[in-house]
Image: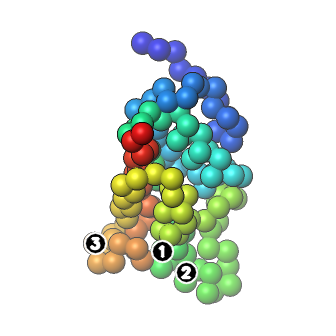
Amino acid sequence: MPEPIWADAAEPFPLEDESFDVVVLGELLEHLPMPDRTVAEARRVLRSGGRLVGSVPNAFRLKSRLVFLAGRPPESDPTHLHLFSPSAVRELLADFDQVQLRFVAGRLTRLQPRLFANDICFRGRKPLR
């Protein structure tokens, strides 16, 4: 079994190009100063056709919008440096094929996923060469 590799996700990964079939970025991107760099690094280490999967909080859900309208910040976690809408996630994954978003977690998600889901889960495929 390979040894774990510890790295700073905001820095270049200490990994060779095209060395993984899957990269998971779960509940991470909102904490990074430049999430686009981390996604680019994930793409670099993915093999052709490899998958990127992950999730971010749905900062544009109805609850956050109502809190903002009440004059308070929509996010109370001081470690969240970025707020992601579905379109922002799609933009972040622009260099991937077959991008899919799923809206998950929350009692009312089945009624209107974009408005009531707590999280946006995503996946994309590195284009085939």
Measure how far apart labels 3 and 2 are at the Cα level: 19 Å
Extreme residue in the top direction: 1
Spot occupied by residue 25 in the image (x, y as percentages of width and height): 50, 44
Residue situated in front as seen by the camera: 40 or 110: 40
SS class of the residue under badge 2? helix
Residue 89 visible in the displayed image: no
Name the residue tied to disc 2.
65
Point 33% across, 77% down: residue: 112
Spot occupied by residue 14 in the image (x, y as percentages of width and height): 64, 26
Answer above or below: position of 96 versus 42. Answer: below
Point 59% across, 40% down: residue: 41
Q: Earlier in the sequence, mark 3 or mark 1?
A: 1
Q: Quadrant of the N terminus?
A: top left
Q: Amino acid at mark 2?
A: Arg
Extreme residue in the front direction: 129
Measure how far apart labels 3 and 1 are at the Cα level: 13 Å
Point 65% across, 58% down: residue: 80
Name the residue tied to disc 1.
61
Residue 25 visible in the displayed image: yes
Name the residue tied to disc 3.
110
Q: Earlier in the sequence, mark 3 or mark 2?
A: 2
Horizontally, residue 84 falls left or right of residue 117, namely right
Point 37% across, 64% down: residue: 103
Q: Amino acid at mark 1?
A: Arg
Answer above or below: position of 16 versus 113. Answer: above
- The 10 Å Cα crowd at callout 3, few under 14, some 14 to 19, many 20 or more, is few
Q: Quadrant of the C terminus?
A: top left
Spot occupied by residue 55 in the image (x, y as percentages of width and height): 46, 53
SS class of the residue under badge 1? loop
Q: Are marks 3 and 2 in contact (CB under 8 Å)?
A: no
Horizontally, residue 72 falls left or right of residue 56, namely right
